[in-house]
Image (cartoon, helix red, strand yellow):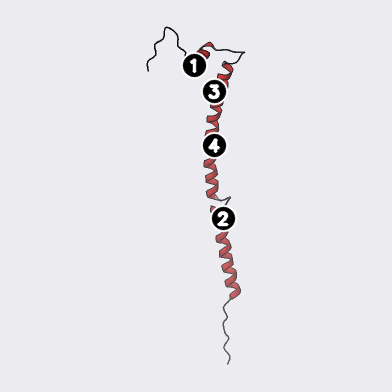
Amino acid sequence: MITPQSRPAVGGMFFLVLAFTLGGYFTFAAVQGDYGVFRRVQIKAEVVELTAERDQLAAELARVQNLTHRLSDDYLDIDLLDERVRDVLGYLRADEVVIR
């Protein structure tokens, strides 16, 4: 009587290893890849930071535009001009006292 030899299923093992390898690769890519979860969180934090910086720069731009308009030929604010002359040139009036 001949006993049948059981051969290991190499094809089935190969398919199983390949499936686990591909599953692990795609799971890793979904979490830490260029378009993964961690990158998305990082991008959202960067968006919040850059939005705050943009708002700050817009406020600074509005302030500078206001000062520029107030010193233009069309609209001259005497108080602002006096302030800038004192700051830049160091001028004082005769009735002022400077404390340093």
Query: How far is the residue under mark 1 from the one under mark 2?
Result: 62 Å
Q: Which of marks 2 and 3 is nearer the N terminus?
A: 2
Tell me the amino acid under the disc marked 2: Ala
Say the numbered circle drawn on residue 50.
4
Q: Nearer the viewer, mark 2 or mark 3?
A: 3
Residue drawn 57% across the image and 12% down it: 76
The picture places residue 18, in percent across and down from the top left corner, at 59, 66
Q: Nearer the viewer, mark 4 or mark 1?
A: 1
Tell me the amino acid under the disc marked 3: Arg
Write down the residue under mark 2: 29
Query: How far is the residue under mark 2 from the one under mark 3?
Result: 46 Å
Disc 2 + disc 3, Cβ < 8 Å: no
Q: Which residue is situated farthest in the top direction here?
A: 95
Q: Which of marks 3 and 4 is in front?
A: 3
Query: How far is the residue under mark 2 from the one under mark 4?
Result: 27 Å
Tell me the amino acid under the disc marked 4: Leu
Residue drawn 59% across the image and 75% down it: 10
Query: How far is the residue under mark 4 from the one under mark 1?
Result: 37 Å
The picture places residue 71, in percent across and down from the top left corner, at 57, 16
Write down the residue under mark 3: 63
Residue drawn 53% across the image and 26% down it: 60
Say the numbered circle drawn on residue 8.
none
Query: How far is the residue under mark 3 from the one under mark 4?
Result: 20 Å
Say the numbered circle drawn on residue 89.
1
Q: Earlier in the sequence, mark 2 or mark 4?
A: 2
Q: Which of marks 2 and 4 is in front?
A: 4
Q: What element carries label 3?
A: helix
- Toward which corner of the image does residue 6 lie, by quadrant? bottom right
- Toward which corner of the image does residue 99 lie, by quadrant? top left
Q: Which of marks 3 and 4 is nearer the N terminus?
A: 4
